[in-house]
Image (cartoon, helix red, strand yellow):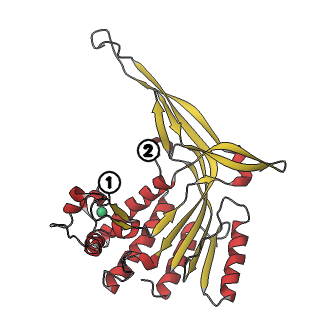
Amino acid sequence: MFLSVGVRFEANVEALNMVETAGNYGKHRRVPYLVEEDGKLKTVYVPAISGESLAHAYQEHLVREALSAGLPVCDDCQRGEFYKSMNKVHLGKKVNPIPDDPKAIEEAIVKACVVEDVGGFLYAEKPPVRRSSAFQVSYALPVKSVALFATSEPQLHARHAQMDASSKKGNASEQMIYYVETGTALYGFTFNLDLDAVGVSAITSKPVLDGDEIKKRREVSLKALFRMLSSSQFGAKLSRFFPVGGITELVVAVTDHPFVVTSPIYDDYIEKTKRRLEVLKSFGEESFLVVAGEEKVPEEALKEAIDYLNEKGAF
Ligand SMILES: [Zn+2]
């Protein structure tokens, strides 16, 4: 089964994805973006949050959910360092001696770590072994119709220290001034989860875990997504720049085979998603769609989708 979520969230004064510091200036990630104005396309630079940043957060939630369900997570992933068995040093901590057969390597990694099972890995040695991530996430980008209102603006901050002549050393300043570029936008992003890929070999397409373990792992994958969206624990600088705002709309589609909701950067994404699912229905494919907005809160919509998957026997 395949789950696809479109999320719209309003974030005022956020510093969720900073890219570089030049001197005392911390820059927000910005991307070129096509918008239409007066019937003409033009490119504007807008604040954005990378898919890497969102994926990192999701995997951190996955660690917590997996551990609390008593499922295995390797030491690197437990620390939030997602090296993912990239070389012999990291793989050697999971399986020793390291097998020669790619299938045996993949199986050992999948068994040892839920994060690498769900989030994929690349073992770049001989033989190389690659496992695609079962989840996909887009960049978070401003909603098209209001993208021109998205801003990134530096905010001045200062740190002070009390110093008298005797404690002052060298050029140490009593005051440090720094700028943090903050973004403000209505963002949209898409998150997909292929539940059929969990616990299944990417090489042979056969399960490498028993049915019960696969179901438990699917359940924690869903709980991690629920927790990430419900808690708004994603992105950087939350301790002082926790975004003011929250999820304004959310749509979840569950299908037997891969189907991705229309991107929430478009205003008609809910209507389009419904119409696209109707076509699938005409092919005899069952689907489930739930929308959170004015009537439902995001948690209710996500719970309904999880309940549907449970009824369908996904976990
Ligand atoms: Zn791991």
Q: Please tell me whether mark 2 sits on a helix, a strand or a loop.
A: helix
Decide if residue 99 is in sight here. yes
Check disc 1 and give the amino acid type: Glu
Could you say which disc has been placed on residue 81 in the image? Answer: 1
Which label was assigned to residue 239?
2
Q: Residue furthest front?
A: 126
Residue at the spot x=54%, y=50% of the render? 49
Q: In this picture, is 303 found above or below 77?
A: below
* Screen quadrant of the C terminus: bottom left
Query: Picture coordinates of residue 165 (x, y %)?
Result: 31, 8
Relative placement, left or right, of 54 versus 216 is right
Tell me what residue is drawn at x 15 percent, y 67 percent: 97
Quadrant for ligand 1 reads bottom left
Q: How many marks?
A: 2
Residue 7's place in the image compared with 105, above or below, is above
Residue 60 sits above or below residue 33 on the image: below
Indicate which label's residue lies in the foreground, 1 or 2. 1
Query: Is residue 175 placed above or below 45 in the rendered structure?
Result: above
Element under disc 1? loop
- For disc 2, the neighbor class at 10 Å (few under 14, some 14 to 19, many from 20) is few
In this rendered view, identify the residue nearer to me: 251 or 195.
195
Query: For residue 227, which quarter of the picture?
Result: bottom left
- Residue positioned 45% across, 77% down in the render: 195
Asked whether the viewer can see residue 93, the reply is no
